[in-house]
Every structure is written in structure tokens, then in C-alpha cells.
């Protein structure tokens, strides 16, 4: 039987089939992998179900064809998860306001997160540091996700679970 803390939510708009191999690795280690292809689906799952970890793609579109001020949808989802709201600098033109999701389940707000980025720079590092710390760990890896990155992340999640 898979417990809530062995359920992993993977959020990526590239499609579930692209990550079959990585999913198999996680399943062999006892994880039930739940897939979400967009932010709305991810928010819905994070408000209604509990997970033990999250793998999150940085470059999720937040609103189709619209990424304001260079902030990617994955970062917005992580900000909502940690803080329960959108960043203050996120200012959408009138009429483009997304539906505000309710707050995430408390158990999910501190999830260990593997943040997957096609590029890594100082701005991303700075943004992640603001959301890291006592809110729950955020590890950043480059895309494509490497098998060793998955193993390190799963090992870290296991260590955190044992420390509780």
C-alpha cells in the first residue's frame, strides 16, 4: 500500500510519456507518481490531496501564451504552494486574471521540491532562496532530469522523512 508520503506529484507540460523511464525509477523505489500537465490541475491536486514530494518544471505556462515579466509558471506555482498567494510583482493586465486557487493543504506546503529548469542563473538561484529554508527544501536540477538527480532527490526525501 502506498501512503500519502510516498505519493509524488510531477508537474510538467511536456507530457507524461516523455518521462516514462524516470517514472519507472520512482515506482521501483515505492513511489506512486501522479501527473499534472498544467498549473490548474496541479493546484487542484495540491488543495485536495496530500503528497510526499513534488517535481516541478520551471517553464510551465501560467496563462496560455502569456508569461508576465519573465516569471515562469513553475515559479508561480511554487510561490503559491509556499506562501498561499501569487507574488506581489505579478501584475496581470485587466481581463487576464487567473482564477485564484484556494490555499494548498497544509501538509503540502512544506513538500520537498525538485525544481527542474532548462537554464540556471543567478536570478533563478535568488528566487529559489527566497522560497527555500523553513518552508521546505527546494533542489534545482537541469533539464533533462538525470537518473542520478532523481536518486539524490529521493534519498534526500527519505532522510527528511526519517528526521521527523
Image: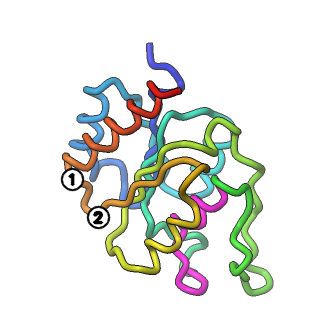
Q: Residue at x 36, y 67 (%)?
A: 117
Q: Quadrant of residue 14?
A: bottom left
The percent position of residue 155, horizontal first and vertical second, equals 31, 35
Residues under numbered marks 1 and 2 in contact, where contact means CB atoms less than 8 Å apart: yes
Secondary structure of the residue carrying numbered label 1: loop
Q: How is the image coloured?
A: rainbow
**For the view shown, which residue lies furthest in the top direction?**
1
Count up the numbered dots.
2
Q: Give the extent of the magenta segment.
A: 66-81
The percent position of residue 160, horizontal first and vertical second, equals 45, 34
- Mark 1 = which residue? 146
- Say which mark, if any, is on residue 142: 2
> Callout 1 environment at 10 Å: few (<14), some (14 to 19), or many (20+)?
few
Q: Report the magenta stretch's main SS.
A: helix
Residue 76 in the figure: left or right of residue 145:
right
Q: Nearer the viewer, residue 46 or 164?
A: 164
Is 73 magenta? The answer is yes
Residue 115 in the figure: left or right of residue 151:
right
Q: Residue at x 28, y 64 (%)?
A: 143
Secondary structure of the residue carrying numbered label 2: strand
Q: Does residue 3 lie above or below 60 as drawn?
A: above
Amino acid at each position: 500500500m502506498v501512503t500519502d508520503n510516498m505519493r509524488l506529484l510531477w508537474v510538467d507540460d511536456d507530457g507524461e510519456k516523455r518521462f516514462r523511464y524516470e517514472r519507472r525509477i520512482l515506482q521501483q523505489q515505492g513511489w506512486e507518481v501522479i501527473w499534472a500537465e498544467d498549473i490548474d490541475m496541479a493546484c487542484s491536486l495540491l488543495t485536495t490531496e496530500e503528497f510526499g514530494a513534488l517535481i516541478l518544471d520551471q517553464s510551465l505556462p501560467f496563462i496560455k501564451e502569456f508569461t508576465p515579466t519573465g516569471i515562469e509558471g513553475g515559479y508561480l506555482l511554487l510561490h503559491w504552494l509556499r506562501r498561499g498567494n501569487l507574488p506581489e510583482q505579478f501584475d496581470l493586465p485587466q481581463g487576464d486574471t487567473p482564477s485564484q486557487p484556494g490555499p494548498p493543504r497544509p501538509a503540502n506546503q512544506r513538500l520537498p521540491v525538485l525544481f527542474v529548469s532548462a537554464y540556471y542563473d543567478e536570478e533563478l538561484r535568488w528566487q529559489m532562496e527566497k522560497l527555500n529554508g523553513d518552508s521546505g527544501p527546494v533542489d534545482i536540477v537541469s533539464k533533462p532530469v538525470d537518473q542520478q538527480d532523481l536518486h539524490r532527490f529521493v534519498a534526500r526525501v527519505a532522510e527528511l522523512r526519517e528526521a521527523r
